[in-house]
Image (spheres, coloured by chain):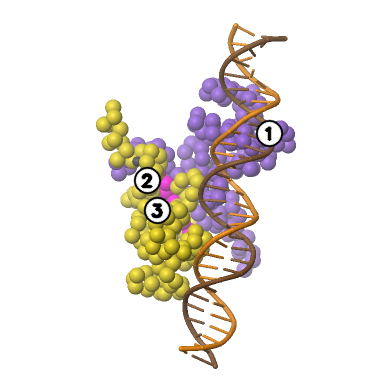
Chain colours: A yellow, B purple, C orange, D brown
Amino acid sequence: MEKYKQILVDRGIKPTYQRIKILEYLDKNHSHPTVDMIYGALYKKVPTLSKTTVYNTLDIFREYDLVDVLTITESEIRYEYVLQPHHHFFCKRCGKILDLDVNCVYQEAMCVEGHKIEAIHGYFKGICSECLLKNENVS
Amino acid sequence: MEKYKQILVDRGIKPTYQRIKILEYLDKNHSHPTVDMIYGALYKKVPTLSKTTVYNTLDIFREYDLVDVLTITESEIRYEYVLQPHHHFFCKRCGKILDLDVNCVYQEAMCVEGHKIEAIHGYFKGICSECLLKNENVS
DNA sequence: TTCTAAATTAGAAACTATTCCTAATTCGGT
DNA sequence: ACCGAATTAGGAATAGTTTCTAATTTAGAA
Ligand SMILES: [Mn+2]
Ligand SMILES: [Mn+2]
Ligand SMILES: [Zn+2]
Ligand SMILES: [Zn+2]
């Protein structure tokens, strides 16, 4: 609790109970959750929580660069507590989103073809190693 | 018309008028349009066109690998007639989506960290060169 | 501690991209 | 031209997100 409160205070974000809990959830869950996943996990502990508050909080976290936003799937936005920049893998079979440790030449680029770069998203899509193994068992 | 009809026939897709027109639009417009943009441009020429048909058609085109799908923005899906694989730039100021000619080391990779790769999407986000120029004039 | 103004939250309503459903139309082969 | 199958149109439904507003909470002043 105190750790997350401190992070918020340091950034100049008013450390409300809801914000602390959401930040804690993001820090402890690297599943790149959707708003629904965050809400679903927290409303048991914070029964009055509303989905709007989750949206509001994530918007603030974004504004203060506490979270990154992924548009790797087609129907919903996914969030993660911001760490090192990294790329992502999406398994078309089981839906998992995994961090990739690929070294991207452009990660540090300020500029590409005359355009100013502020963020780079590398989305790899296919079948994850786990699902590939399950497949072997089947055949 | 004939050119697009032929493309559809070659793939085994029944070449209806709607499908031909949508394919023609995609081939002549490299703006990575949304469903609404496609519908808005075509319903003048094809007054009975329905948005559902645009969705249906794009789903078929996808299935037959005639179009690629971009999830570069947060609120809608964008489509493009499939060419060489390439990465994209999204301008946060004017909303344009541009093709990038960056050479990605992983473009040919079959496998990354044990996961089978079927597609790679590189989304670069920032301010485009045109918007940067406009900025200079302002200051 | 009590008071007050400003910020935050909750919940419902609105919005919008997409999907679903179904009847009417069109298509291709006979 | 006829028929069964595929496609289309358009309205209804769905779901993620945003907007609105009143109630609550916060933090600082008195
Ligand atoms: Mn990640
Ligand atoms: Mn493109
Ligand atoms: Zn998987
Ligand atoms: Zn621009």
Marks 1/3: CA distance? 38 Å
Q: Residue at x 59, y 43 (%)?
A: B34
Q: Amino acid at mark 3?
A: His
Which secondary structure, mark 3? loop
Which secondary structure, mark 1? loop
- Mark 2 touching mark 1, by CB under 8 A? no
Give the mark, 2 or 3, whose residue is nearer the N terminus. 3
Q: Residue at x 34, y 70 (%)?
A: A1
Report in which chain the residue with disc 1 lies.
B
Q: Is mark 3 within 8 Å of ligand 1?
A: yes
Q: Amino acid at mark 2?
A: Lys
Left or right: A134 as drawn, with respect to B30: left
Q: Is mark 2 within 8 Å of ligand 3?
A: yes
Q: Name the residue carrying label 3.
A: A32
* Residue B128 pos. (x, y %): 56, 55
Residue at mark 2 shares a chain with residue at mark 3 = yes
Location of residue D23 with respect to B115 vertically, above or below: below
Q: Name the residue carrying label 1.
A: B49
Residue numbers of the magenta segment: A118-124
Question: Of the numbered discs in the image, which one, if any, rests on residue A96?
Answer: 2
Q: Residue at x 62, y 29 (%)?
A: B19
- Mark 2 touching mark 3, by CB under 8 A? no
